[in-house]
Image (tube, helix red, strand yellow):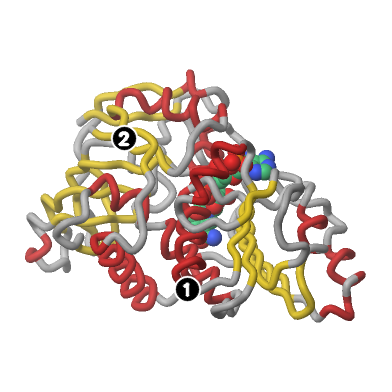
Amino acid sequence: MKAVAVHTFGSPDGMQVIDTSTPTPPAGHLLIQTEAIGVGGVDAVIRRGTVSGSGFGPGYVPGSEVAGIVTKTGEGVDRIWVGRRVWAFTGVGGGYAEHAIASVGNVVALPEGLSTVDAVALGSAAPVAHFALAQARFTAGESVLVRGASGSIGIAAVELASRGGAGSVTVTASSASRGERLRGYGATHVLDRDGNGEGPGLFDVIIDIVAGSALPRFIERLAPNGRMVLVGVVAGYPPSDFGMTLLGAFQKSLTLSTFSLDTVPAADRDRTRIELFDAAVRGDIHAVVQDVLPLDRAADAHRRMDEGTVFGRLVLRP
Ligand SMILES: NC(=O)c1ccc[n+]([C@@H]2O[C@H](COP(=O)([O-])OP(=O)(O)OC[C@H]3O[C@@H](n4cnc5c(N)ncnc54)[C@H](OP(=O)(O)O)[C@@H]3O)[C@@H](O)[C@H]2O)c1
């Protein structure tokens, strides 16, 4: 089968199309013939070599999110899965391929009416946004800021906060045109990446996908009893003393927490993922796919990720 592997970590030029044998699903796993492969921010982080000390070596096949048809089951997996259209989380890699393996606990059947392309734009991102808002104890009427809203997690957070009756939904974006697009998903105010622009001064809830050196400035924008949930670090880690900002605002009773989908019980995660897929079929939330590229153009997809021109998601098709 055809796959894309990283031979040299660093630039996207180090990615190559390879011919490799189709894997056999081990016990508890399924083999999926991929139709759509999500290009995740984490794929780019690993390919850049930022986390090369974490066991990723030459020949590593990126990709953690695919959708397609189940063609084989491993020992202990009900053969009823064969032929089903599914979304799957493949773990830390293996997705950029014509066939991918996933454990049966990381697969959900797709509802009719949801394309495989839309599934890989929403399958991880929408549950992250949903549970991050829940962790923030978001309630109707509150002011919400989504920092780094132009990606698939951020857009889902904007739509879910808006549909949940937020009093206002402010976003950060790197250009006015990206901000305008976010207004189409429910944003009421647009700030630049530094937080400048017209909008509420303080926020009840901040969903932060960015972190980085500006994080303390955004902690200062929490209202009394405000809650910030960190779900990503697209701008890297914050300054090591960022906790001082929290302590400096002691009288405001703030909450700062991290959120990872990994800690959500599997049954809750799957139920919510299915509900969100159904919401997409109804048109209540939207998969935002910037482009669908052939699998052998994975390096081009990564170049676009590095340029910062992606709005929503890029998807590969084998
Ligand atoms: N918590 C979880 O369970 C979970 C699950 C999956 C992924 N993640 C994490 O979520 C992140 C990826 O999410 P995503 O795919 O939605 O994000 P993304 O598309 O990679 O980035 C979101 C937006 O952030 C803005 N941005 C990028 N670099 C920035 C910078 N240096 N400063 C300020 N803003 C910047 C960009 O918008 P503008 O150009 O418009 O500003 C970008 O479109 C990764 O950190 C990943 O590890 C977390």
Q: Residue at x 26, y 66 (%)?
A: 278
Q: Is residue 61 above or below residue 9?
A: below
User: Visible in this render: residue 308?
Assistant: yes
Give percent across and percent down for residue 102: 28, 55
Closer-to-camera residue (152/5): 152
Closer-to-camera residue (2/170): 170
Q: Residue at x 53, y 43 (%)?
A: 180
Q: Which mark is residue 200?
A: none
Q: Residue at x 46, y 68 (%)?
A: 130
Q: State the residue position of label 1.
A: 164
Q: Is residue 92 above or below residue 243?
A: above
Q: Is residue 306 left or right of residue 238?
A: left
Is label 2 in a helix, a strand or a loop?
Answer: strand
Give percent across and percent down for residue 124: 40, 57
Q: Amino acid at mark 1?
A: Gly
Q: How many marks?
A: 2
Closer-to-camera residue (162/299): 162
Quadrant of the snapshot with the N terminus: top left
Q: Is residue 84 left or right of residue 1?
A: left
Q: State the residue position of label 2.
A: 316
User: Visible in this render: residue 54?
Assistant: no
Give percent across and percent down for residue 201: 77, 62
Marks 2 & 1, CB-CB < 8 Å contact? no
